[in-house]
Image (cartoon, rainbow, N blue to C red):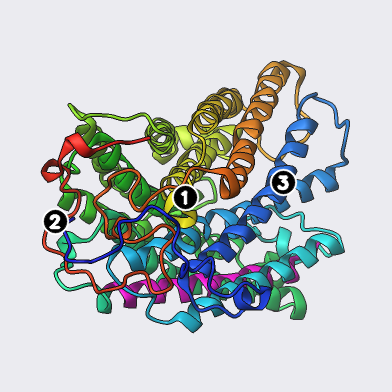
Amino acid sequence: MSTATQVPAALEMPRDTYLNAGYGVKSWFLTKDHKRIAILYLVSITMFFLFGGLMAVLIRLELLTPAPDLFQSDTYNKLFTMHGITMVFFFLVPSIPATLGNFVLPMMIGARDLAFPKVNLASWYIFMIGACFTFSAYISGGVDTGWTFYTPLSTSYLNTHVVAAALGIMIAGFASIFTGLNFIVTTHRMRAPGMTWFRLPLFVWSMYAVSLVQVLATPVLAITLILVALERGFHIGIFNPQLGGDPVLFQHMFWFYSHPAVYIMILPGFGVISEVIPCFSRKRIFGYSAVAFSSVAIGVFGFLVWAHHMFAAGISTYSALVFSLLSFIIAIPSAIKVFNWTATMYKGSIHFNTPMLYALAFIGLFTIGGLTGLFLACLGIDMHVTATYFVVAHFHYVMVGGMLVAYLAGLHFWWPKMTGRMYPEPPAQLSALITFIGFNITFFPQFVLGYMGMPRRYHTYPPEFQVLNVLSTAGASVLAVGLLLPMFYLLWSLKYGEIAGNNPYRATGLEWQTESPPPMHNFHETPIVTQEAYDYESMNEEEVVIG
């Protein structure tokens, strides 16, 4: 992307960066700089990821044998509930928007900051307050309803701290709303001169679609959880059939948010992959408009498919057929993205740097997750595999194999811009390979377990399922190594990494036209955009040095 920006070309790290402006702890906790707020989110969600990962390790250790060796039933129920709540609401949902989106979106459109810097900081505080409420529920005795809070489990049983956990999630939801509003207004009002809608990077398109979903869907979750708390506290008959309520109503309201929430998690990953693949293929993205509009289409159709989670819950056959058809339709814009990424790589000059390895892993894993989603959209097959480990495997292929891998791709891609330092490539590439192998060993056997009929959320199972469970637990050990390695070499790179320079990947985005790390207000002069995004063909390939 050509610009008229005048920025220093020196490779030394600048002195007026967001990292060096104000050294005290207070300067971080009172900052209104979107880049520092992104770092605060990054540290926070990393802690939550480690906690949720620890719960996953304990779950897999319990499932190593058919007998309940480590935990009683109640404890096991609390483990998988805490794992699900932490990973979904405090890692997967905020991971890319609150960290990478917060950091690079203003720079991508040539803005000095987000539209509402104080609201941006408030969103992080609200997120942390919500986390405190939810984790207080864990400390007080835990929650054993599953991360979906299905009624009557969440409304009739008294030995679980549902209200505190639900209140924390509801509060954290306001952080998502604030972030979404900030991104929408920033994208509309703060684009640099010449940055038309069809010159926007595809990451911005994805974040815009995500923001619309966050703003429109999250209030429904908040209302649903408030009703659960009211029913639980005042015995008002809303969802509990013993009080005259309807538990299916809860599922309608919960999934009306939670299926769009799937796209809150995965759409940002699509945006990351759309940045990485053109850069490391040295080609213009194939079908820019189709990829951009497919993000909006996914956001729209995401509101129309919630009831495919309820085929076995007693909805009418007519409703099930309609939602089955809609679930097939929403696969089309996702397939468009995969086809266009593949076409972008065709005859490209591909460089297998770490972000590209994660992007390739994303395509493979998300494709498996998406195709198995079509199985669950089929009424007959869904009746057989619903509430089995087939669903667990599908969900993790989409969320972990998709979103988490895309998050790692984006984190490695923009790490030089965030820190001004390069990470060491060999251990990073090894980590990507270990993660891909470990993930497949962990979750592919669970497709077979689900097809064979092993139900989810059980800590005991028939002996004939043990071999596949042992294989899955062994794969989880490999996956843990792959996911922990980046913590070590990325932290190492902060002090010992090679100076990155302004644009180590010779990428075309505006964020690469300023220093690394960026100055406080991103640009010394307002950039002027004169060409479309991903115009790699016009760059002098002789000067391109990647890695």
Estimate how packed mark 1 is, as few (under 14), some (14 to 19) or many (20 or more) residues with alpha carbons within 10 Å: many
Q: What residue type is labelled 2?
A: Glu
**Is residue 10 depicted above or below 336 in this figure?**
below
**Is residue 283 depicted above or below 416 in this figure?**
above
Q: What residue type is labelled 1?
A: Trp
Badge 3 marks a residue whose secondary structure is helix
Mark pair 1, 2: CA separation:
24 Å
Circle number at residue 415: 1
Residue 240 in picture, x, y percent from top left = 68, 67
Residue 276 in picture, x, y percent from top left = 33, 43
Q: Look at the image and tell me whether residue 279 can be seen.
A: yes
Q: In the displayed structure, does residue 476 sit left or right of residue 6?
A: right
Residue marked by disc 3? 80
The boundaries of the magenta stretch are 159-187
Residue 65 in picture, x, y percent from top left = 80, 24
Residue marked by disc 2? 532
Q: Decide which of tag 2 and tag 3 comes sooner along the chain.
A: 3
Q: Does the magenta stretch include residue 321?
A: no
